Image (cartoon, rainbow, N blue to C red):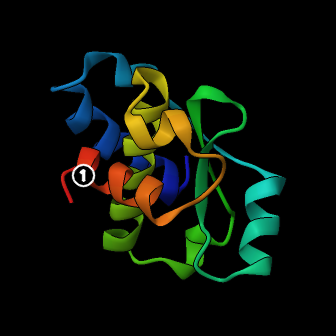
């Protein structure tokens, strides 16, 4: 198990204490995340394209993010998972990325 999976697991376990179904969420490395990262450096992860219960990371996260940054990205992406599954307003109506969608994920994650 790599560093990203380990850190993601810590965040998931903590979040699942409040939202038990989050224990179902899995983390994967995926080519789409790698491609997004190559296009724009700050894109390290996304959620939703492999199903509600999957968060994808770019492989670059293993070496380019600190542990703290990885923990933050994991929490943010779990915020998207909650918003998508539970139909939070911005996630239910927005198509693609927007500042409102990103802010909603941050609010859910507690940031």
Q: Is residue 42 left or right of residue 66?
A: right
Q: Is residue 45 above or below residue 10?
A: below
- Residue 1's x, y, as percent? 55, 46
Q: Residue at x 48, y 59 (%)?
A: 3
Q: Is 55 placed above or below 98 here?
A: above
Mark 1, residue position: 107
The quadrant the C terminus occupies is: bottom left
Q: Of residues 44 and 8, which is closer to you in this image?
A: 44
Task: Work out whether residue 39 or residue 63 is closer to the camera in this orientation and state it.
Answer: 39
**Residue, x 24% and y 52% (percent of image)?**
107
Q: Is residue 63 visible?
A: yes
Disc 1 crowd, CA 10 A, few/some/many (<14, 14-19, 20+) = few
Q: Position of residue 74 (x, y in %)?
A: 41, 53
| Horizontal side, residue 107 vs residue 1: left or right | left
Residue 88: percent from the left, percent from the top?
38, 32
Which residue: 24% across, 35% down?
Answer: 15
Left of 107 or right of it: where is 61?
right
């Amino acid at each position: 198990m790599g560093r990203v999976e380990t850190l993601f697991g810590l965040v998931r376990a903590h979040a699942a204490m409040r939202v038990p179904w989050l224990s179902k969420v899995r983390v994967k490395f995926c080519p789409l995340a790698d491609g997004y990262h190559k296009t724009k450096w700050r894109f390290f992860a996304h959620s939703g394209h492999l199903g509600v219960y999957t968060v994808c990371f770019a492989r670059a996260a293993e070496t380019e993010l600190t542990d703290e940054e990885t923990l933050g990205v994991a929490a943010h992406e779990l915020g998207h998972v909650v918003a998508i599954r539970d139909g939070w307003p911005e996630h239910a109506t927005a198509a693609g990325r927007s500042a409102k969608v990103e802010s909603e994920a941050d609010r859910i994650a507690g940031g």
